[in-house]
Amino acid sequence: MLLELQHLICIFKLNQIKPPILKRTIFLLLLCMASIGQAIGQSYSFRSYRAENGLSYNSVICSVQDSRGFMWFGTKDGLNKFDGYTFKVFRNDKRIRKV
């Protein structure tokens, strides 16, 4: 990385670019390199849940996390509240009349 930076500085000097432009270019280059390195260094963990694990339906339409940390998943079969361990399913009761 340092060698690449030195190479770029030499190229800019050869082209006789003004120093403020050179400083700005080097700053933006370093900023991009730092952000790419940070993104590559992150690791993610992903666990999938299915109807066999308590989810009411295998296809989730929407999801949201509330202020208390519960994850809510909307499916065709109902609303699912997940506490990190188990699902509680809330289904529409079709016997209740709409007002």
Image (cartoon, rainbow, N blue to C red):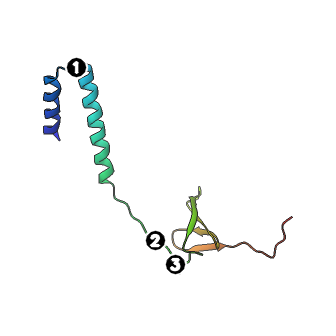
Image quadrant of residue 32? top left
Image quadrant occupied by the C terminus: bottom right
Residue type at numbered disc 1: Pro
Residue type at numbered disc 2: Ser
Residue pointed to by mark 3: 53
Whether residue 71 is visible here, answered yes or no, is no
Of the two numbered discs 1 and 3 in the rendering, the one whose residue sits closer to the viewer:
1
Callout 3 secondary element: helix
- Where residue 71 appears, x then y in whole percent? 56, 63
Q: Give the residue drawn at x 24%, y 30%.
A: 26
Crowding at mark 2 (Cα within 10 Å: few <14, some 14-19, many 20+): few
- Where residue 34 appears, x then y in whole percent? 28, 42
Residue 92 lies left or right of residue 80; in this view the side is right
Query: Spatial distance from mark 1 to mark 3, Cα to Cα?
Result: 62 Å
**Residue 48 marker:** 2
Farthest bottom residue?
52
The count of marks equals: 3
Residue pointed to by mark 1: 19
- Where residue 61 appears, x then y in whole percent? 58, 64
Query: Spatial distance from mark 2 to mark 1, Cα to Cα?
Result: 53 Å
Q: Is 50 situated above or below 27? A: below
**Residue 90 marker:** none
The answer to which of marks 2 and 1 sits earlier in the sequence is 1
- Where residue 60 appears, x then y in whole percent? 56, 67
